[in-house]
Image (cartoon, rainbow, N blue to C red):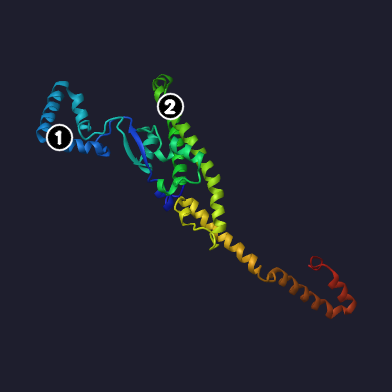
Amino acid sequence: MPSYYNIDTILAEEELIVARPAFDFALLSHLDPDSHRLATSTSSAGRKRARDDTDKENALNGTTDKLKSVGGGGSHALPAGTKIKMPMWALERWAMLGFIRISSLPKHYGKRMKERLEADPVSVDLRSKNEHYFLTGLLLTSFLHRTVHAFQKSQRRKSKSRSSANNAQKVAMENISLLATSLQQSLLTTMMGDRLCRNFDWTLSALDSMEDDVSGHLLKLSVLEKSMFERGVEASGAVGEWREYGCSRMGVSVAVVKGKSMGRGLEMTTSGGGGENKKAKVVGLPLRALQ
């Protein structure tokens, strides 16, 4: 899982996902933008008549409708199956609990976008779609896979009689799993394919003033690709400096200096007591033998 305090991850999880409630959500009608327009267009007299009719129906039908009214089954409830758009981070917990259904991906991760990336990945302007295109896509695939896994785990806990009644839901989850796998393959192919090669080609010419301007190329890159481009430019600059000036003079290793000083100390201690012949023999021995 990505870090909670990673700014790029926070921005990537702001991607809007289309979802539909699996049941009526009490007091959440404001999540549907059409509900506000319908409420404002209704006259006060019409709303009063609707409330009167609801009260009469509740009085006739008994306690069940009254409880439904108290639970938010009136105008403040979000009906099941209503299309809503919310950020990925806001839908994650609901999806894990099975409260919502996700049937499609955002347009810039859909089938048409995949076909464009397969045909000509270099010319596609990913930054205009989503600045964190690849990171958002990878988080989206992980989100969908975890949703399917949570659904399968909940189905294993239920009895066979109950699970057999949810065949449509199983098919929907299988479709989500296929969409997530297809999206993951498309992201990896796009990120590690021709776009990566072209990005590295531009890094080699970015430091040369005689080459074309790279500003137009940078406008099409996502945040990840732009970061890779900047690292490539730094590496190209370092290679150019090495070719022009060469490597600097290498300093003597500290271990070598210490080894020589220890050898000299042993030479001085042995030369005082045993004469020149003994000194020569001791100096000729390896340092490990003396220790």
Along the line of sight, the residue nearer the viewer: 33 or 3: 33
Secondary structure at numbered mark 2: helix
Provide the residue designation for mark 1. Answer: 42
- Compared to residue 208, the image places residue 3 above or below, namely above
Image-based side of 271 in relation to 57, left or right: right
* Position of residue 232 measured from the top left corner of the image (x, y, whole percent): 55, 57
Considering every residue shown, the one lying at the far left of the view is: 45
Gap between marks 1 and 2, in whole Å?
43 Å
Eye-nearest disc, 1 or 2: 1
Q: Residue at x 10, y 35 (%)?
A: 44
Q: Residue at label 2? A: 155
Assess disc 2: are there few (<14), some (14-19) or many (≥20) residues with their C-alpha within 10 Å of its C-alpha.
some
Establish if 197 lies above or below 99: below
> Is residue 57 shown to the viewer in this render?
yes
Q: Residues within 10 Å of mark 1 (few under 14, many from 20)?
A: few
Q: Amino acid at mark 2?
A: Gln
